[in-house]
Amino acid sequence: MAESRCKFARNGRRNSGNTLSMVGRFRHFSYRVRVRILGSVRGPLVWILRTGQLHPDLVMIGRSPLVHAWGKIEVGKGLRLRGLQTRTSITVGPMGHLTIGENVFINQGTTIHSELRISIGDRVEMGDGVTIYDTNFHPVAPGDEVKVAAVVIGDDVWLGNGVKVLPGTTIGRGSVVGAGAVVTQDIPNGTLAVGSPARVVRSFEVPPEFKRR
């Protein structure tokens, strides 16, 4: 009798766990659907209000970005902006020009500031807290000029969590920049770069047909 009760208790706990697991999966699925639908509707509305440009397939997941567009912004189709915990900030100065390619993913907490020109290629992936500047904002030493130089990020690049891309740098197609790296000089095509300053630790072939997503 005791053994039967134990089996019943074990089966009861197992069934309860399965039920809770199914409920959890359903809630997660329904949350993702709601976020996607709301983001698909809200994204184009927010973007047109802040930039004056219509992008019907733009998706914002979570909090909308802070956008200050005094200069020129060009955005390809399929842009996704995620801001569940922290907002992304996009600023383009009066003489700035920001170009974002197709199917780009910008994660939460990212900061992009252009006073001259920033070009982001197709299918670029950005982790949380990425920073991209084409200006130093301030002189390093008394009498120095403020550095302002174009930034180019090639197609199918992956920028890890917390990467900082500084003025005058180019990141080649298909390359990966590891979390926390500081890009102070050009990164060739098909390489993995890590550290501060970022240095290449691995090279690999990037087939012409390769697409990061």
Image (spheres, grey):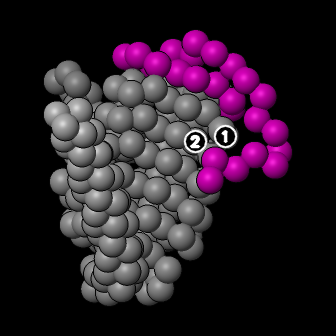
Give the numbered dot on residue 102. none
On screen, 57 above or below 179?
Answer: below
Q: Are marks 2 and 1 in contact (CB under 8 Å)?
A: yes
Q: Name the kind of residue labelled 2 in the image.
A: Val
Taking the view exactly as shown, the residue that stands out farthest to the front is 1
Residue 92 appears in view: no
Q: Name the kind of residue labelled 1 in the image.
A: Arg
Question: Viewer-proximal residue, 195 or 142?
Answer: 195
Left or right of 10: which side holds 209? right
Secondary element at image label 1: loop
The residue that appears at 50% across and 34% down in the rendered structure is: 169
Secondary element at image label 2: loop
The residue that appears at 49% across and 29% down in the rendered structure is: 177
On screen, 171 above or below 30?
Answer: above
Q: Quadrant of residue 11?
A: top left
Within-10-Å neighbours for mark 2: few <14, some 14–19, many 20+: many
Q: Quadrant of residue 166?
A: top left
On screen, 70 above or below 115?
Answer: below
Left or right of 5: which side holds 203? right
Could you tell which of marks 2 and 1 lies nearer the N-terminus? 2
Q: Position of residue 30 (x, y in %)?
A: 33, 72
Residue topped by disc 2: 157
Give the numbered dot on residue 173. 1
Residue 213 appears in view: yes
Chief SS of the magenta region: loop
Check if residue 95 falls in the magenta segment. no
Question: Viewer-proximal residue, 89 or 126?
Answer: 126
Question: Viewer-proximal residue, 77 or 42?
Answer: 42
Check if residue 206 falls in the magenta segment. yes
Region in magenta: 189-213
State the separation of the CA atoms marked 2 and 1.
Answer: 6 Å
Q: Quadrant of residue 102?
A: bottom right
